[in-house]
Image (cartoon, grey):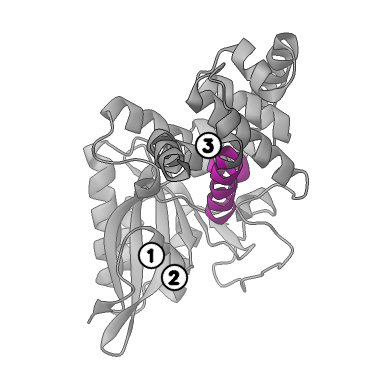
Amino acid sequence: MTHDLSAEFTGRTEPFRRELLAHCYRMLGSLDDAEDLVQETYLRAWRSYGAFEGRSSLRTWLYRIATNACLTALTASGRRVLPSGLDAASADPHAAATTDPDVRWLGPLPDALVTSDADDPATVAATRDSLRLAVIAALQHLSGRQRAVFLLREVLDFPAAEVADLLGTTTAAVKSQLQRARAHLDDIADTAARPNHPTDPRGQALLDEYMRAFENSDAAALERILHRDALIELPPSRTWFSGKKTCVAFLAAYAVGAPGDWRMLPTWINGSPAAVAYHRDGEVYQPYGVVVLTIGDGQLLGITVFSDPDLVRHCGFPDHQPA
């Protein structure tokens, strides 16, 4: 009997795992934290599944568990940031990288973990737009409950009364929280509204040009595709750069290296064109991390580099490449 119940639970709840991971990531700004909270959600759901009476949909019930688990986690942690959310940009392309072990960095989310080729294209587009790095960074400025209300109402389109029931509050309180969240985001989220059209053919061409420039050690090619106001961020370094001249100087001096030093493969991360990066080490290319691009005005507006080799595996790529 227990086996039958377990199979029933898995069959009914597993289809929601990807969207719950996306929701927890939007709440927390960290893939590792989101994965932990999804596991916690399923554990709590299994423990109380026998008492589930179906007074709400199974999906709503799972979102109730996940959202409240995220809210509990947020009470013990501060907001996550990108370097541009901490200090002013450095005007010196040769500035030393500064790190701070106490900073909680916002992390990337590979699209492959939350979308699939079988999904409806409109759903994929909406999911990607709500996962952009600028959007996630802006959400970090909201309180936990404001963040939950905004995501449940604006991103997931839950009715206000259902959100109130889900969070154990009133419909009036939900409407008030949503109004405050919108006002706060209007004040701080100018960058979140910047154009980013990842499905535009030019966006894909820019990704190809970016990867080819690195593989060929061609700083001039990077200069051609960078926007005049482009920025480069490299968490966990607090140091970041803004403006084409500074960015190109930094890339030429410290990044592109020699021809053949890099191998890059295309992917999607945070709803944007991205590259999985490998760096040559003798006869093999070792995983380096991922690069997320922000596209706008037909050029590269932003380059965010996450130098974490584990992210290569999260994106579904092998641990090394032959040279």
**Which amino acid type corresponds to the residue marked 3 in the rendered image?**
His
Q: Does residue 198 appear in the picture of this structure? A: yes
Q: Nearer the viewer, mark 3 or mark 2?
A: 3
254 relative to 168, above or below: below
Q: Which residues are magenta?
A: 25-46
Find residue 309 and name its label. 2
Pointer 3 with pointer 2, Cβ within 8 A: no
Residue at the front extreme?
A: 1
Cα separation between marks 3 and 2: 24 Å
Among the 4 quarters of the image, the one containing residue 146: top right
Q: Nearer the viewer, mark 3 or mark 1?
A: 3
Residue at the right extreme?
A: 76
**Which amino acid type corresponds to the residue marked 1 in the rendered image?**
Val
Residue 212 point in image, percent of width and height:
24, 63
Pointer 3 with pointer 1, Cβ within 8 A: no
Question: What residue is disc 1 on?
Answer: 312
Residue at the bottom extreme?
A: 282
Question: What residue is disc 3 on?
Answer: 23
Residue 316 point in image, percent of width and height:
32, 60
* Picture residue at 55% right of the left edge, 41% below the top: 46
* Picture residue at 57% right of the left edge, 16% below the top: 55
Among the 4 quarters of the image, the one containing residue 27: top right
Q: Main secondary structure of the magenta part?
A: helix
Q: Secondary structure at mark 3?
A: helix
Q: Is residue 163 left or right of residue 277?
A: right
